[in-house]
Image (cartoon, rainbow, N blue to C red):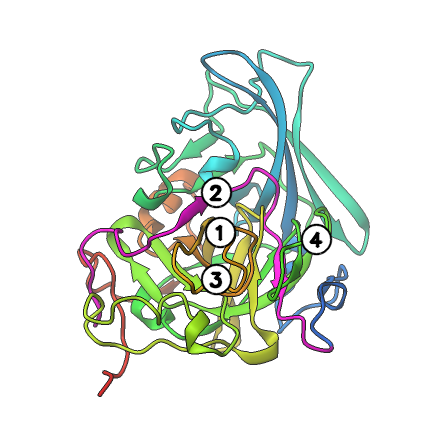
């Protein structure tokens, strides 16, 4: 079990985006960005990803009334009407909801699901009188403090052709080193250089989780190229983490994140069932010589954080107020541990 007090070891330049998180590939043959474009109705690793949609929001700042546009991703939950996304997709820097309200009928936000029946679009506005957007109580605009989760109630049931997702509610320690599959609509590229593919196309990728911060409801991983010199977490002070070793990637299938895809989904499969366990929140470019390009460009050697569903499950269930069928419910342990890590010790 690994523990770390405080986020100080996660040193680097913080980023997030209002676009949509992309998938950055290893660049190996067969693993270029164009090889990772998804097709509606075609599962990836047994996951029907058509329930991960592209969110386009019209934001109206609650303080300044400034109107702007942004985009992100969200996933349809088991209720068929609720979306799970990152809070920062629909809030300002202080954590206040800034989606254009129902009192301003000119501007409308929407989510688009790419399906075999074509693109299905559902609009939504924020209704202050009858709240339909719920922000996790821990979210205040500070990424490293966690809580970057939001629920959007569409007010209607989405067409049955769009898949629904259950969340992971088990022990986050069981996620460590488990391969997962992620989907995103944002920028892309290859790990050896800066991203250079534009956003708006859904791609998929894989990675593993290195750390879990249950008290902050965060999960952390990095974009590895197989070299220990470019392993973000492996290059950190081992004494800080109790002398544990970190994996150096999944080889050619390893994927990272880029500007955007905030609010999209990462899935694990347990006993042939798929569970949404994390929502992309932020990324960090290293201030040391771990990053292959020494710049914040989403290349090998950078790390990232997900908002974790398991520690936030009570809030999620309360926000949707509809019992989840077949939820994977396990006993949570170590909820007060800041960073937990299961790994063999280095000798």
Q: Where is mark 1, residue-wise?
A: 280
Residue 269 vertical position relative to residue 129 in the rendered view, above or below: below
Question: Of circles 1 and 4, which is in front?
Answer: 4
Residue under the image location 53 percent in, 74 percent down: 225
Q: x%, y% of residue 160? A: 68, 51
Instruction: Tell me, yes or no, whether the highlighted magenta stretch contains residue 204.
Output: no
Q: x%, y% of residue 316? A: 39, 45
Question: Of circles 3 and 1, which is in front?
Answer: 3
Magenta segment: 1-29
Whether residue 238 sits left or right of residue 70 in the image: it is left
Instruction: Tell me, yes or no, whether the highlighted magenta stretch contains residue 12.
Output: yes
Q: Earlier in the sequence, mark 1 or mark 4?
A: 4
Q: CA distance from mark 3 to mark 1?
A: 20 Å
Q: Earlier in the sequence, mark 3 or mark 1?
A: 1
Q: Earlier in the sequence, mark 4 or mark 3?
A: 4
Q: Secondary structure at mark 1?
A: strand
Q: CA distance from mark 2 to mark 1?
A: 7 Å
Q: x%, y% of residue 164? A: 58, 54
Q: Earlier in the sequence, mark 2 or mark 3?
A: 2
Q: Residue 86 got which mark?
A: 2
Disc 3: CA contacts within 10 A as few (<14), some (14-19) or many (>=20):
many
Disc 1: CA contacts within 10 A as few (<14), some (14-19) or many (>=20):
many
Residue placed furthest toward the bottom = 347
Residue under the image location 58 percent in, 47 percent down: 259
Q: CA distance from mark 1 to mark 4?
A: 20 Å
Q: Nearer the viewer, residue 287 or 345?
A: 287
Q: Where is mark 4, residue-wise?
A: 196
Q: CA distance from mark 4 to mark 2?
A: 24 Å
Q: Residue 339 got which mark?
A: none
Contact (Cβ within 8 Å) of mark 3 with mark 1: no
Q: Where is mark 3, residue-wise?
A: 291
């Amino acid at each position: 079990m690994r523990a770390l007090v405080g986020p100080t070891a996660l040193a680097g330049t913080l980023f997030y985006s209002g676009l949509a998180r992309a998938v950055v590939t290893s660049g190996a043959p067969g693993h270029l960005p164009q090889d990772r474009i998804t097709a509606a109705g075609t599962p990836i690793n047994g996951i029907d990803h058509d329930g991960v949609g592209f969110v386009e929001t019209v934001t109206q700042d609650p303080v300044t009334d400034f109107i702007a546009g942004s985009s992100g991703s969200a996933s349809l939950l088991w209720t068929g009407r609720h979306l799970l996304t990152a809070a920062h997709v629909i809030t300002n820097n202080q954590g206040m909801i800034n989606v254009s309200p129902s009192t301003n009928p000119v501007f409308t936000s929407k989510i688009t699901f790419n399906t075999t029946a074509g693109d299905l679009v559902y609009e939504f506005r924020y209704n202050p009188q009858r709240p339909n957007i719920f922000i996790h109580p821990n979210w205040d605009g500070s990424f490293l403090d966690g809580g970057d989760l939001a629920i959007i109630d569409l007010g209607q049931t989405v067409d049955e052709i769009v898949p629904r997702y259950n969340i992971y509610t088990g022990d986050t320690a069981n996620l460590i080193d488990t391969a997962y599959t992620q989907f995103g609509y944002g920028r892309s590229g290859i790990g050896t250089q800066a991203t250079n593919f534009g956003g708006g196309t859904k791609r998929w990728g894989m990675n593993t989780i290195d750390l879990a911060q249950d008290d902050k409801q965060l999960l952390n991983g990095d974009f590895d190229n197989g070299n220990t010199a470019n392993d973000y977490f492996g290059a950190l002070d081992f004494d800080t983490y109790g002398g544990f070793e970190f994996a150096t990637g999944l080889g050619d299938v390893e994927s990272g994140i880029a500007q955007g895809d905030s609010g999209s989904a990462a899935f694990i499969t347990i006993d042939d069932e798929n569970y949404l366990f994390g929502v992309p929140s932020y990324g960090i470019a290293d201030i040391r010589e771990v990053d292959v390009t020494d710049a914040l460009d989403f290349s090998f050697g950078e790390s990232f954080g997900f908002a974790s569903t398991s520690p936030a499950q009570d809030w999620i269930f309360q926000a949707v107020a509809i019992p989840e069928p077949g939820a994977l419910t396990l006993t949570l342990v170590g909820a007060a541990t800041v960073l937990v890590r299961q790994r063999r010790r280095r000798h």
